[in-house]
Amino acid sequence: MSFEKWRNIGNEIMNLLRVETYPVAVKLVKENENFPDVVRRPLETLKFKINLCQAFTATRRYGWTIGVSKKECACPLACFLFGWASLKDKKDLTDFFFKSGFFRSVKAAEEGAEFTIKNCTLKPSMYKGIITSPLNRTKIIPDIVLIYGNPTQAFLLIHGYLSGVGGALEIQYTGRHASCGHGVIQTFLSQKPNLVLPDEGDKIFAATTDEEVIFASPAKDIESILEGIKHLFGKKIMKYPTPFNVRFTPAFPKPFEEFLKKLEGSSS
């Protein structure tokens, strides 16, 4: 699909759902690929390292196309998840989760670490970085698309997806490594959409608001999701903003009813 086609899809998503920020196109950069010249690099542009969730925010709010590699990523957990750094022993991840306070027992931390390694971690040396770009003006062909919106907008995206495949959206979420691990990696590995709640990193470092959730989708499904939303809107089953029903006579407290009777010319 061409850049123009992706940009049109980005604009259609924004027009249909009226999301407040740009949908984020995400590309995983393979070891044998280069970062395009049009990509901003944190150490060059900002003069400091950033977290990946910060890159998502700069893309969706500033419209920046950003490339982040190991040397530019400030988050140690993200470096591990994306295969830019490795552990000598996976027990080290268990210890990290337990000591950080995510779990009340080592056993629970072990289970948590096992899920993360299996579902939210890329193999070392497969990808040397990621690029994020606003979908409606994208400078990359995306692997994943992240759409930040309110619960109603996410609800419509889920309906758009399910209108073509049926069944239910299966959500797997841990409360950790939300936008990077669940939003990007898990979605990439499973090749299925996911609904992600922003975690403490997204909120503290990336200014994600309490009203926002993340709908993450493989890029291959976005066009079908968009067609599903347009189908639903065309059938007038749903719409956004939600068209509240105001076609009824409101009921008033008794003093209002008594006052109405005292008005000259009013009907009873």
Image (cartoon, helix red, strand yellow):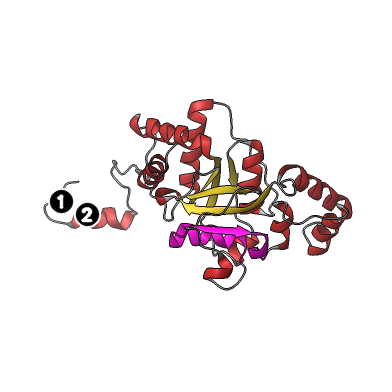
Q: Position of residue 253 (x, y in %)?
A: 34, 54
Q: Which residue is mark 1?
A: 266
Query: 262 or 70: nearer the eye?
Result: 70
State which quadrant residue 2 falls in: top left
- Kindly identify the residue that appears in the image at 62 percent across and 42 percent down: 187
Q: Is residue 61 on the magenta stretch?
A: yes
Q: Position of residue 154 (x, y in %)?
A: 50, 44
Amino acid found under the numbered disc labelled 1: Ser
Left or right of 86: which side holds 143? left
Is there CB contact under 8 Å for labels 2 and 1?
Answer: yes
How would you rate the neighbour count of disc 2 (Cα within 10 Å): few for under 14, some for 14-19, many for 20 or more? some
Q: Position of residue 3 (x, y in %)?
A: 42, 43
Q: Is residue 208 on the magenta stretch?
A: no
**Callout 1: SS:** loop
162 lies above or below 248: above
Label annotation for residue 149: none
Query: 122 or 206: nearer the eye?
Result: 122
Q: Position of residue 53 (x, y in %)?
A: 59, 59
- Kindly identify the residue that appears in the image at 52 percent across and 59 percent down: 66
Amino acid found under the numbered disc labelled 2: Leu
Left or right of 218: which side holds 240? left
The quadrant of the rendering that contains the N terminus is top left
Which residues make up the magenta segment?
50-74
Q: CA distance from mark 2 to mark 1?
A: 7 Å
State which quadrant residue 199 falls in: bottom right
**Does label 2 or label 1 sit earlier along the sequence?**
2
How would you rate the neighbour count of disc 1 (Cα within 10 Å): few for under 14, some for 14-19, many for 20 or more? few
261 lies above or below 158: below
Q: Which residue is mark 2?
A: 260
